[in-house]
Structure formats: structure tokens, C-alpha cells
Image (cartoon, rainbow, N blue to C red):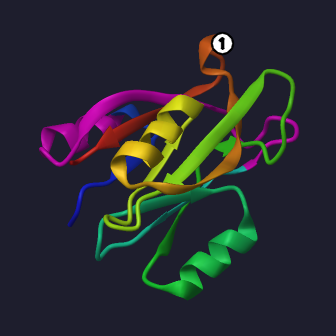
Amino acid sequence: MGSNHFYTENPGVVTSAIKQGDYHLEGIACYVVYISRAGSIPLYHLSDPNSGNHFYTTDKAEVTSTIKQGSYQLEGFSVAAFSSSQPGTIPLFRVFNPNSGDYLYTTDEAEAQNAIVNNGYRDKVTACYVNDIRSGQGIPLYRLFNG
């Protein structure tokens, strides 16, 4: 398996991934919400068991097309985000590295741009909208990396 990012809201999963030596914690990627928040939609988690890569989206059509295109399978969802800007939210950018198959998600536009310019990523899109990380509101979505 190549290097990749993995995101979870579950501190137990974070601890387990680190203890197994598979990943190291890079920090909190953003703050998400529970499904019950008005206007929120599921943040779907898909994974490729062959490469170990992870893909996240709020778009049901993207879930379907990603599964049809290859070996990704739906892991489910336990948290939510927003498909459009809401008061107190910021964009969660997604960039893709075609060499490793890794998807990087960040609220920092400069980090996304740096990944494109210096690390072989491309295709910056807004994956969804999440609570502003500076607010500390919501559920932390932890970012781990195994590279």
C-alpha cells in the first residue's frame, strides 16, 4: 500500500491506527457535525482495500460513480457536512495525487495549493463545507497519514 491520508472523528480509531504503526496523527483537519444538524448531509467514506486509499464526499452521485469506476467500496458515514456555504462554515478542499491515489482534504487553501505545486497533487475542488476550524465548534475530524 502506498502512502495515504485517513480521516476519522473517532478518537479510538485514531489511537488504534497509531498503535498499530500504520498512521501518524497530523492534527484536526476540520470540524464536522452530526447528521441531525439542520441543513447537514452525510459525509460518505469510501475506501479502496487494494491501495488503502480513502475518499470522502457529500455527493451521492459521486459515491455511485466512484464505486462503479473501480475498487472503492462504501464504508458508510457517521458525521455530516454541508453541500453549500452556511453561516460559520468554510470550504473543505480536496486535491488528488494521481501517482499515489491519495486524496488530501484541507481547509487551508495555501496547503492545497502547495500540495499541487510541490507534491504532485491536482484537481482542487471544494468537497463540502465544514465548521470553521477556528471556532472549535462541532466534532473534530482527525487527519492521519501513513507516508
Q: Give the x, y percent position of residue 84.
A: 84, 43
Badge 1 crowding class, 10 Å Cα cut-off, few under 14, some 14 to 19, many 20 or more, is: few
* Residue bearing mark 1: 135
Q: Which of the 4 image quadrants contains residue 138?
A: top right
In magenta, the rendered stretch is 12-41
**Residue flagged by tag 1: what amino acid is it?**
Ser
Q: Above or below — where is 115 with respect to 121?
A: above
Residue 50 in view in this figure: yes
Q: Residue at x 86, y 24 (%)?
A: 87
Please report the residue visible at 33 percent of the width from the left and 30 percent of the height from the top: 26
Q: Position of residue 83 (x, y in %)?
A: 80, 48
Q: Quadrant of residue 18?
A: top left
Which residue reaches farthest top?
135
User: Is 42 placed above or below 32 here?
Assistant: below
Q: Mark yes or no: residue 108 visible.
A: no
- Residue 92 image position (x, y, % from top left): 63, 39
Question: Left or right: 47 with respect to 51?
Answer: right
Quadrant the N terminus occupies = bottom left
- As for residue 115 lying within the magenta part, the answer is no
Identify whether 64 is placed above or below 91: below
- The residue shown at (33%, 40%) is 144
Identified at 32% across, 73% down, the residue is 49
